[in-house]
Amino acid sequence: MPASSDLSDRPGCVQWPLAQPWPLQTNELRLGVMASGEGSNFEALVTACREGPLRGRVLQLVVNNPGCGAMARAQRLGIPCALVDHRHHHSREQLDGALIQTFAASGVDLVVMAGWMRIVTPRLIGAFPSRLINIHPSLLPSFRGLDAVGQALAAGVTLSGCTAHLVSEDLDGGPILAQATVPVLPGDDRSSLAARIHRQEHRLLPLAVALAAARLRDRTAAAADPSAPAGPPSG
């Protein structure tokens, strides 16, 4: 599913890793998703699971903003949605504890932060080691944190994009799974550039989930059989 397949973006985007076979999936992935806003990446994951090429199911959506667009999408798509409002928790650690309980009850394998606008703590990261994935609207390590699109425009770059990565305690600094570049066109503002980046996020995120699952599978196999030859680097 190369990012460059979006012909509405000219010149085309470049995906890293470059065009490759979809990672082999032997088991159906059980996914949990966290969202704070409209939930378009959440719906892209559901679509990739139901229509291919991602072999998995989204079992649980968690949102922190009552009435957000992601909740409406979940209802339309028939996905269970839980509200875990950060305003009702005294600390980030307490909030993350509630998230852990919700996802544990659903039995998910991987958790995807699809527009989750809260900084997570080591408590959540430790509960899902190498199983917590984030999508960020920049070519990391450039433009970490809030308003990455505005940061890119202010810097005058000619290429922006998005990055899917594993979450670590370093803000937007975990191992990169995949990236897609998006050209910054003359006259672009936050809205126009963000819209084109979002289209690439929808393509990139399902691939990143498959790559994260393959990475876990390879590590599990290596731990079970230390004498087995190592596979290719996974980032």
Image (cartoon, helix red, strand yellow):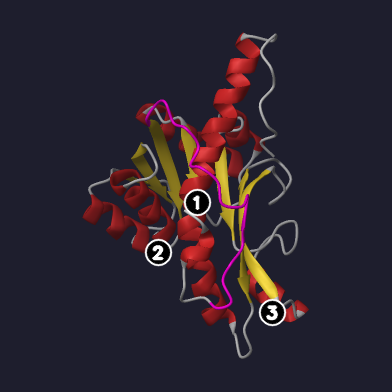
The residue positioned 51% from the left and 57% from the top of the image is 2
SS for callout 1? helix
* Among numbered discs 3 and 1, the one appearing first in the sequence: 3
42 or 219, which lies in front?
219
Q: Which mark is residue 38?
A: 2
Q: Is residue 110 left or right of residue 60?
A: right
| Tag of residue 153 | 3
Query: Where does label 1 land, which residue?
Result: 205
Q: Residue at x 34, y 48 (%)?
A: 46
Question: Up-down: is 189 above or below 127?
Answer: below
Q: Nearer the viewer, residue 114 or 207?
A: 207
Q: CA distance from mark 3 to mark 1?
A: 23 Å
Q: Earlier in the sequence, mark 3 or mark 2?
A: 2
Mark 3 surroundings within 10 Å by alpha-carbon count, few (fewer than 14), some (14 through 19), many (20 or more): some
Magenta span covers which residues? 10-28
Separation of disc 3 and disc 2 at Cα? 23 Å
> Type of residue at label 1?
Leu
Residue 228's place in the image compared with 14, above or below, is above
Verify whether residue 158 appears in magenta.
no
Q: Nearer the viewer, mark 3 or mark 1?
A: 1
Q: Secondary structure at mark 3?
A: helix
Q: Is residue 98 left or right of residue 138?
A: left
State which tag comes first along the sequence, 1 or 2.
Answer: 2
Tell me which amino acid carries mark 3. Leu
Predominant secondary structure, magenta span: loop
In this view, the residue in front, 221 or 137, is: 221
